[in-house]
Image (cartoon, grey):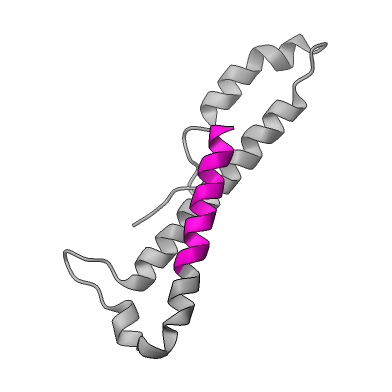
Amino acid sequence: SSLQSVRDSISNQVSAVFQLYQQNTVSLDLLTVTERSATAPSLSDMLEWLQDAERHYRQQFLRRKTLLQTLRADDLSLLESAPKRWKSMESPSAEDRITG
């Protein structure tokens, strides 16, 4: 599925970024990692955003997969409510929201 592809792609990118960060932690002091300006976020902010995005897509994938797995051909009410339930997943809840 395309959502699974997005989830996997983001997960791979986040993993690569964190691996690169860990390889360079010796040369990065705390000020460098946390310094931000009006035009550029700090490195720690950006790493947190990447984790938020990864968590968002992982949760979206799991919720939608679970919804699809609950559908049964013999349960008309589940089938009728599926599009509405699927659509409701497009609006992130407070804990799913990616903040900046």
- How many numbered marks does the figure carry? 0
- Image coords of residue 23 (percent x, y): 47, 80
- Quadrant of the image containing the N terminus: top right
| Vertical comparison of 7 with 15: above or below | above
Q: What residue span does the magenta drawing correspond to?
A: 1-17
Q: Position of residue 82 (x, y in %)?
A: 64, 19
Query: What residue is drawn where x is 75% and y is 9%?
Result: 76
From the viewer's side, name the closer residue of 71 and 97: 71
Tell me if 74 is positioned left or right of 87 in this view: right
Horizontal side of residue 14 vs 99, given as left or right: right
**Residue at (46% x, 34% y) in the render:** 91
As drawn, which residue projects farthest toward the right? 74
Q: Is residue 85 above or below residue 28?
A: above
Question: Is residue 36 shown above or below 4?
Answer: below
Quadrant where the C terminus sits is bottom left
Predominant SS of the magenta segment = helix
From this viewpoint, is residue 95 visible?
Answer: no
Q: Is residue 15 above or below residue 64?
A: below
* Residue 93 in picture, x, y percent from top left: 50, 42
Residue shown at the point (55%, 40%) measured from the top left: 5
Pick the residue in front: 87 or 22. Answer: 22
Q: Residue at x 38, y 72 (%)?
A: 44
Which residue ends up furthest to the left in the rendered image?
38
Image quadrant in which you'd find residue 31: bottom left
x and y, in percent, of residue 92 in the image: 48, 40
Residue 72 visible in the snapshot: yes
* Left or right: residue 45 compared with residue 91: left
Q: Quadrant of residue 72?
A: top right
23 and 83: which is toward the camera: 23
